[in-house]
Image: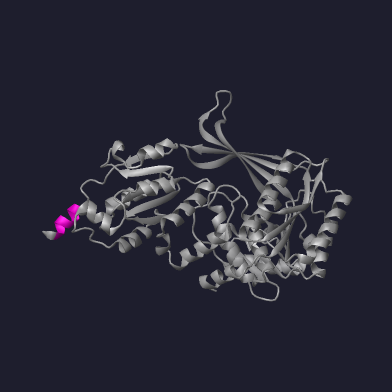
Amino acid sequence: MDQLDLLSAIDQLGRPRVLVVGDFMLDRYTWGNAERISQEAPVILLQADEQEKKLGGAANVCQSLLHLGADVVAAGVLGDDEAGACIHQMLNSIGVKCDLLIRDPDRVTTTKDRFMGRAANRHPHQILRVDREVRKEISASHASKIISGLRKKLISCDAILVSDYGKGTLAEGLLRQIIKLASEQSVPLIVDPAADRNCEIYRGATMITPNRSEAERITGLTIDDPALAVQSGKKICELVDLEAVLVTLDRDGMVLVEREGEGEIFPTDPRTVYDITGAGDMVLATVGLCLAAHQPRPIAAKLANVAAGLAVEQIGAAVIHRAQLRSRLRDRQHPPESKIVGLPQAEQMAGVQRASGKRIVFTNGCFDLLHVGHITYLQHASTFGDFLVVGLNSDRSVRQLKGNTRPVIHQRDRAAILSALQCVDLVIIFDEENPLHLIERLRPDVLVKGGDYRLDQVVGRSLVESYGGTVVTTPLVEGVSTTRILEAAQV
């Protein structure tokens, strides 16, 4: 199975209808700088400057499915409180059908308050989480309403996803009725299991997606190698009468085990992991989407591995679109060239990165005869944020700046060389004498130039500073320049 197979599968997904039942939660984030210790006690002082609400648990699965291109029906129980109203409104606003979400005045909506501290305005990390929840089982009358609603909706649904966080929505009796309904209608049912429940309650499901620790608890096997995850998956299939098990192994990728076949190991790509929040939800959503669209389980596992990788590169529960899956798969086909984009695509990609909490860095130059000074400069520039965009002067604009003997290297080749650098995320070739138009469209958080420029000479400085961005210059590597290299070559 190669990248072309996966790209073809994405194009065949269509728009299936998926029903999500489970524990709906609200994630609230408070962001700020954490650079001081309180005078009252030896604790970090968070200078809060931003607050954000995100969907969690089954609500995040719904959101993920919708953005991946499914029609989504949500079923579960919310508290009759502010958090419950917020979840309902957020889901409804993006097009999730919420008529099976019951409001219970005797129940508290599960909320998780995360406090995110930045050091030197960069790379936020979670410093505290505060949970509000109840774990009692929902009432028999609410369970009856859910089953009645599911029975009506299931006729037009292509899959059921069960998001079990052990918060009481999925009482054992209700879960067994849901599995029975799915079996009667021949609808695939995929479960993201709760960490501390008896796996027997999922008997008869199509597939479950335990993580490493959950699979270890179910089987008693210590999984310190993907091959052991295959053994664990086989054992779970036998124990619980499942068609398949997908064990997620964080840094080691995933393992798919089917009852009638051998296990398959899907390694993950090396990456910077910012936040694992919601990665399991993303796996469940992607697998569910694929099985609803009648894709083979190995295809579903492969695409889920890609989607989860994209999710952990972002802060908080991430929203991933099909276009991002396509883009990542194309990157794997042609890694260096895939970074060379036009301005409209760069603007879109920068927007996605910014929405996930990343800082956009922009720099520009001719980069003719790439040398150690250029590489040092670009590596330094990348440390000012999370996503480095390089504006590259076209051959025509280089001639305007440097004369008719330059550039020595064609713009296509210069762009390919820059793309091969790990610190560079995007390359845009521009034809103007300066990059002001790119800066206006991309609105970088940080604008970087080499130390041979004074701040008052940096094109775009006033614009970037006008919306709160930062302009910096970096030191040069002494004695190294393209001009000196060319002069030495002529001796």
Tell me the quadrant of the picture where the N terminus can be found: bottom right
**Residue closer to the observer: 82 or 255:** 82
Q: Is residue 13 above or below residue 465?
A: below
Q: Residue at x 23, y 58 (%)?
A: 407
Residue 126, how many percent across, how many down?
57, 41
Instruction: Depth check: give the residue in front, 94 or 188.
Output: 94
Question: How did the renderer colour the structure?
Answer: one colour
Magenta stretch, overall SS? helix
Q: Is residue 129 magenta?
A: no
* Figure quadrant of residue 187: bottom right
Taking the image as drawn, is residue 253 in sight? Answer: no
- Residue at 70% of width from left, 60% of height from top? 220
Left or right of 484 on screen, residue 172: right
Task: Name the image quarter holding the C terminus.
Answer: bottom left
243 horizontally vs 251: left or right: right
- Magenta residue span: 483-489
- Residue 61 visible in the snapshot: yes
Question: Is 486 inside the magenta-drawn segment?
Answer: yes
Residue 133 coordinates in the image, percent (x, y): 75, 42
384 over 226 or under it: above or below? above
Q: Is residue 421 left or right of residue 46?
A: left
Q: Is residue 344 above or below residue 458?
A: below
Where is residue 363 drawn, in percent x and y?
A: 35, 48
Q: Is residue 26 left or right of residue 5?
A: right
Q: Residue at x 31, y 37 (%)?
A: 455
Image quadrant assignment for residue 30: top right
Of all residues, the one furthest to the top in this rendering is 40
